[in-house]
Image (tube, rainbow, N blue to C red):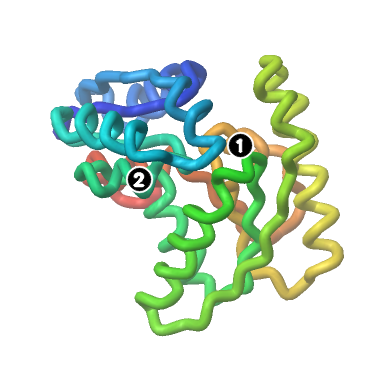
């Protein structure tokens, strides 16, 4: 079983992935690196200094998995698996259009680019409907995870009511994963943590 080094920008993800690994592959060893400063600095764009720092640290880590979408393109350049890659591949496979929910503006471009790439790789035109939810991020930052998840789910249900053609919903940030428990729409809602960990550990995509 492959040991992994996970790079997070929020400490809450440590417990999320430890719980997933304990359920999926108890023998796997996860090493966590938590760098909230990387996300803070990335909000204004990733400059050369930040890019070099991320590249250097991740390149030295064995079997790296980056759980932050905002810094993911740089992490991939350093050899890491980005957390949302398996999710975006699965979303594109539904044919689209895909509703992409996100809370941080810094997530929009890397997530949209990756989903567009996933569509292109299977020969389909991208069908992406962004659902920005920046006003909800404060609930995550103030450690109100249940309220955060429920409000995201409410907005997704409302959006699906207005766009019945949607074939799939993606929760662009790992921090949004719990919202899938509260969405009532029958449309598939994909989150990245479990799909990414299964991929990184060489496990099947279904349990």
Q: Residues within 10 Å of mark 1 (few under 14, many from 20)?
A: many
Quadrant of the drawing holding the N terminus: top left
Among numbered discs 1 and 2, the one appearing first in the sequence: 2
Quadrant of the drawing holding the C terminus: top left
Query: Could you tell me which secondary element the residue under label 2 belongs to?
Result: strand
Residue 167 at x, y percent in the picture: 63, 69
Q: Residue at x 38, y 53 (%)?
A: 85
Residue 24: name its quadrant: top left
Residue 95 at x, y percent in the picture: 54, 76
Q: Is residue 41 above or below residue 142?
A: below
In the image, is 173 to the left or to the right of 129?
Answer: left
Q: Residue at x 38, y 54 (%)?
A: 86
Query: Could you tell me which secondary element the residue under label 1 belongs to?
Result: helix
Front residue of 148/57: it is 57
Q: Is residue 203 above or below residue 31?
A: below
User: Residue at label 1?
Assistant: 176
Viewer-nearest of discs 1 and 2: 2
In the image, is 104 to the left or to the right of 198?
Answer: right
In the image, is 114 to the left or to the right of 82?
Answer: right
Q: Residue at x 51, y 82 (%)?
A: 125
Residue 81: name its quadrant: top left
Residue 131 at x, y percent in the picture: 71, 54
Q: Is residue 6 above or below residue 76?
A: above
Front residue of 202/112: it is 112
User: Residue at label 2?
Assistant: 82
């Amino acid at each position: 079983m492959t040991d992994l080094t996970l790079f997070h920008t929020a400490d809450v993800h440590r417990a999320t992935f430890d719980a997933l690994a304990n359920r999926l592959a108890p023998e796997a060893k996860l090493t966590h690196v938590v760098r909230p400063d990387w996300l803070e600095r990335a909000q204004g764009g990733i400059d050369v200094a930040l890019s070099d720092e991320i590249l250097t640290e991740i390149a030295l880590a064995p079997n790296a998995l980056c759980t932050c979408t905002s810094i993911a393109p740089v992490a991939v350049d350093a050899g890491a698996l980005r957390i949302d890659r398996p999710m975006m591949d699965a979303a594109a496979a539904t044919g689209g259009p895909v509703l992409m929910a996100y809370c941080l503006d810094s997530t929009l471009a890397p997530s949209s680019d990756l989903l567009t790439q996933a569509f292109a790789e299977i020969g389909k035109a991208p069908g992406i409907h962004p659902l920005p939810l920046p006003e909800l991020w404060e609930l995550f930052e103030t450690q109100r995870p249940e309220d955060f998840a429920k409000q995201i789910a409410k907005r997704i249900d409302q959006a699906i009511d207005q766009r019945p053609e949607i074939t799939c919903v993606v929760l662009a940030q790992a921090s949004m994963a719990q919202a899938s428990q509260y969405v009532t729409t029958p449309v598939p809602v994909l989150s990245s943590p479990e799909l990414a960990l299964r991929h990184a550990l060489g496990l099947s995509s279904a349990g």
